[in-house]
Image: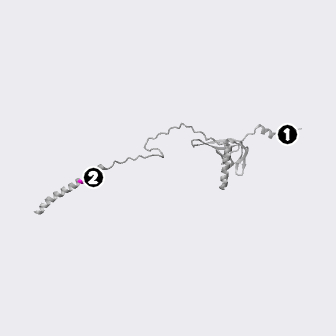
Amino acid sequence: MHDKRKTRVGLPVLLLGSAMMIAGVSVGVSAQQTEEKKPVVKTRTYAGGRDPFKKYEAPKPGDKKAGAVLVPSIQERISLYKAQKTAAMNARMPAPKPTTALLLNEIQVIGISRTPRGYAAIVEATPIKLSYVIYPGEPFFDGQLVAIEDSRLIFRRETVLTNGRRERSVEVKPLRQPNAVGSMATAGPAESSASTSKP
């Protein structure tokens, strides 16, 4: 009989204790849920490019017009070439070609010849009155010799703009035509010999 009372009382106490325990745990959990901090919204900064989630907007055209960079004078280019040549000699490297100080519009094609290395051209630098023999691939201040044909030279001109871009174009230079003074000088001795042989 005594055992039956214990069981009758023990069972409700056990149920009541477990119910209180469950209620206490649920109150603690709900209290913890209300105390939780709101998640911090992180904003990304896109220093290197545009935000991938924003609609693309085309860049506005700039008001500045890009022009060609001013070319230094021939004396400045010659002094720059001399400094490069000295630095190359001190470093025991091959010296740069002297044509690197010349602009494409400062040369005239005097003649074209065929050599064991291929075609070669004889050009005259008009500001300094010197002649050079050049081959394809020869560098100039504002371009490079690309090809030599029978009666003309083909250059690739490179123009540097103020915004840093480079524009490339093709330029063709024909052989220099003899002027009237040159043709008279070459025809003079031939005419005099012909006039002496006629009588």
Mark seen at residue 29: 2
Query: Disc 1 or 2, which lies upstream in sequence?
Result: 2
Q: Is residue 169 above or below residue 3?
A: above
Badge 2 amino acid: Val
Q: Is residue 25 magenta?
A: yes
**Residue 73 place in picture, x, y as percent:** 67, 42
**Residue 193 place in picture, x, y as percent:** 85, 41
Q: Residue at x 12, y 60 (%)?
A: 5
For disc 1, the neighbor class at 10 Å (few under 14, some 14 to 19, many from 20) is few
Residue 90 shows in this picture: yes
Residue bearing the label numbered 1: 192
Q: Is residue 102 magenta?
A: no
Query: Foreground: 149 or 104?
Result: 104
Nearest-to-viewer mark from 1 and 2: 2
Q: Is residue 1 above or below residue 127?
A: below
The tally of labels here is 2
Rendering quarter of residue 173 = top right
Inter-mark Cα distance, 1 to 2: 123 Å
Residue 138 shows in this picture: no
Q: Callout 2: helix, strand or loop? A: helix
Write the start and end of the magenta stretch as one range.
24-30
Query: Foreground: 15 or 198?
Result: 15
Badge 1 amino acid: Ser
Q: Is residue 136 above or below residue 8?
A: above
